[in-house]
Image (cartoon, helix red, strand yellow):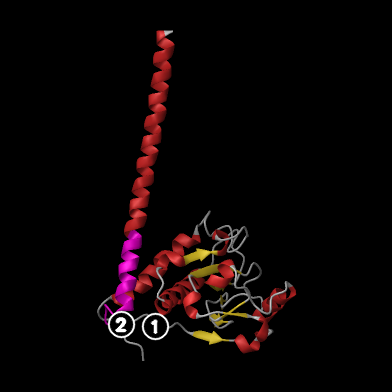
Amino acid sequence: VGQIRFRLAGQEALAAQTEIDGLHADIARLTTDIDDLHRQIQALKDALKGGGDGVILKPAIQDITDQLPRTAKDFKRRQADAIKYLVINHTGGPADLAIDKLAGYHRDRGYPGLAYHYVIDGDGRIMQTNPWTDTVSDQGYLGEGLNIAIAGSFDNDPPSDVQLQAAAQLCAWLLVELRLLPDVIKGVSEFVSTGSPGAQWLKGKRYKDQLLPLVQKVVEDAAKPGTPQPP
């Protein structure tokens, strides 16, 4: 009986030590994440107050809002300061799908037009598809988010490098314009149960973990002395 008790006590001690080791590893990861976030926040603060010689330049954006099928009067209206998140979506179809057709699909779902504010096409070009103040719903992430769609379906593969770089440039500029911090960049699947922005957002290639460092680099580069001034 004594040996059995000793064996059980040993097993419990081993299990407890394994749990403690796991907690230490979790703490180390969280500490690293917190340090990274602090660096991002400081870089963004520097950019906001002109801590470097330059600012985050607005990326090349083509406004195609008026070219899309939309019923303007049926959109909900909001102030820019109501925007709390930059919400990443994928279009879920071919990367070369025409944006006007995508807007038509959204209208077929009962929306007054395209639900996204920006679309990044397969070549990394950024199109604005709605004003910031227009949203298809005043509820949840649609009401509080600026929705950015990357063209394609990212269940098996992440977006291309050129798409991720364009998304980083856009997000970094929007963070400064809206005076938001990097932790507001989220995928739509972090708000609701949906396949967007693709399974690779948080699993597999985890392209969220690719996008955020790119955003951070844009912000940090803007805060460095010698960054070019906008024309």
Q: Which residue is mark 2?
A: 54
Residue 184: which numbered mark, if any? none
SS assignment for the magenta stretch, majority: helix
Q: How many marks?
A: 2
- The residue that appears at 37% across and 56% down in the rendered structure is 33
Q: Which residue is mark 1?
A: 57
Q: Quadrant of residue 4?
A: top left
Q: Secondary structure at mark 2?
A: loop
Left or right, residue 74 beside residue 15: right
Q: Secondary structure at mark 1?
A: loop
x then y, percent, for residue 211: 45, 66
Closer to the camera in the image, 113 or 105: 113
Residues under numbered marks 1 and 2 in contact, where contact means CB atoms less than 8 Å apart: yes
Quarter of the rendering occupied by the C terminus: bottom left
- The residue that appears at 50% across and 64% down in the rendered structure is 186
Give the CA distance from mark 1 to mark 2.
8 Å
x then y, percent, for residue 205: 51, 57
x then y, percent, for residue 156: 59, 58
Residue found farthest to the right:
108
- Which region shows up in magenta? 36-53
Is residue 127 in view from this perspective? yes
Closer to the camera in the image, 39 or 100: 39
x then y, percent, for residue 135: 60, 77
Left or right, residue 71 beside residue 40: right
For the residue marked with disc 2, what is the amino acid?
Gly
For the residue marked with disc 1, what is the amino acid?
Leu
Residue found farthest to the top:
1
**Magenta segment includes 47:** yes
Quarter of the rendering occupied by the N terminus: top left
Residue found farthest to the left:
225
- The residue that appears at 59% across and 63% down in the rendered structure is 154
